[in-house]
Image: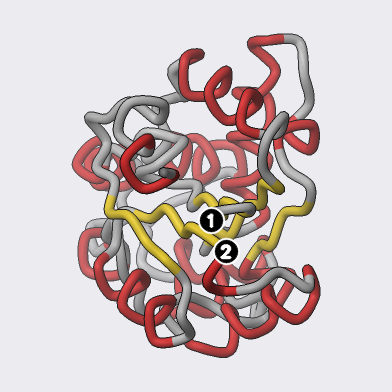
Amino acid sequence: MIKNIIFDLGGVIVGLDKQNCIDSFSAIGFNDFGRIINEYVQDGFFLDFEKGKIGSEEFRENIRKDIHGIVSDEQIDSAMAAFLPGIPKERLDAIYSYRKRYRVFLLSNTNPIAINIVRPMFEISGRKMEDYFEKMFLSYEMKLAKPDVEIFRKVLLDTGISPDETLFVDDSKANLDTAEKLGIKTVLITQQHNLTEDLRPSLC
C-alpha cells in the first residue's frame, strides 16, 4: 500500500520550456545554454550550480564569461525564468489534496535562482510552496543530484519512509531507474498529464 508520494518539480509540477530558455540566453549573448541544460541531465557549471558547489553569483559570472558587453543579474535570472513558464492550478490542487491521505515530499534537481522563480507560482491558490509538502529535498541544499543513488538514500533516511510504501513521480527514466533499485515504486509523468487521473493506477 502506498503511504508516501515523492514529486519531482520541473516537468512534473512546473512546466519546462527548454527552447524558450535557450532563445532567451541567446538574446543576451550567451549561445551555449543548449549544451549545458536539458529537461533531464545538466552538465558543466550548471550541474555544479544544482549540486550547490557554486552559488548564484558564481553561476552568473560563468554566464558572463562568454558574453560580450554588460549583462545584469536581472537579465540572467529572467533568461532562466524562461525555462519555467508556470504551474497549472489543477496540479497544485491535486498535490494539496494528496496531503490528506499521504505523506507528500518534493525531490528536485534545482538551484536558488529557479526556486526564487517558482516559489510565487505556488501562491496562486493562496498557499506557500512549503504548504504542499511535508519536506522539500532540493539538490543544491543537499549537495547531491538525481540520478545519484545517494540522494534517494538520503531522502529515505531523513523521512523514515519505507521504499515499498513510496511512489516516486518523475519525468526522467534515469531517475526512476535509480529509485526502483532501492525498491521505490515509480511512475513516469510527462508535461501533458493530470496528476489525479494519471497517478490513480499507481496508488491502488
Mark 1–mark 2 Cα distance, whole angstroms, equals 6 Å
Residue at point 53%, 79% (across, down): 48
Compared across the picture, whether 158 is left or right of 201 comes to right
Question: Mark 1 is on which residue type?
Answer: Met
Residue 20 location, x and y as percent? 25, 35
* Residue 1, disc: 1
In contact (CB < 8 Å): disc 1 and disc 2: yes
Query: Quadrant location of the C terminus?
Result: top left
Which quadrant would residue 84 be assigned to in this image?
top left
Q: Residue at x 67, y 35 (%)?
A: 101
Number of the front mark, 1 or 2: 1
Compare marks 1 and 2 and give the one earlier in the sequence.
Answer: 1
Say which element carries label 1.
Answer: loop
Amino acid on which disc 2 is placed: Glu
Measured as percent of width and height from the top left, residue 113 is found at 62, 49
Q: Position of residue 78 (x, y in %)?
A: 49, 35
Residue at screen point 66% across, 52% down: 105
Which residue appears farthest toward the top when viewing the image? 125
149 versus 167 height, above or below? below
| Residue 133 location, quadrant | top right
Residue hosting label 2:
165
Helix, strand or loop at mark 2 = helix
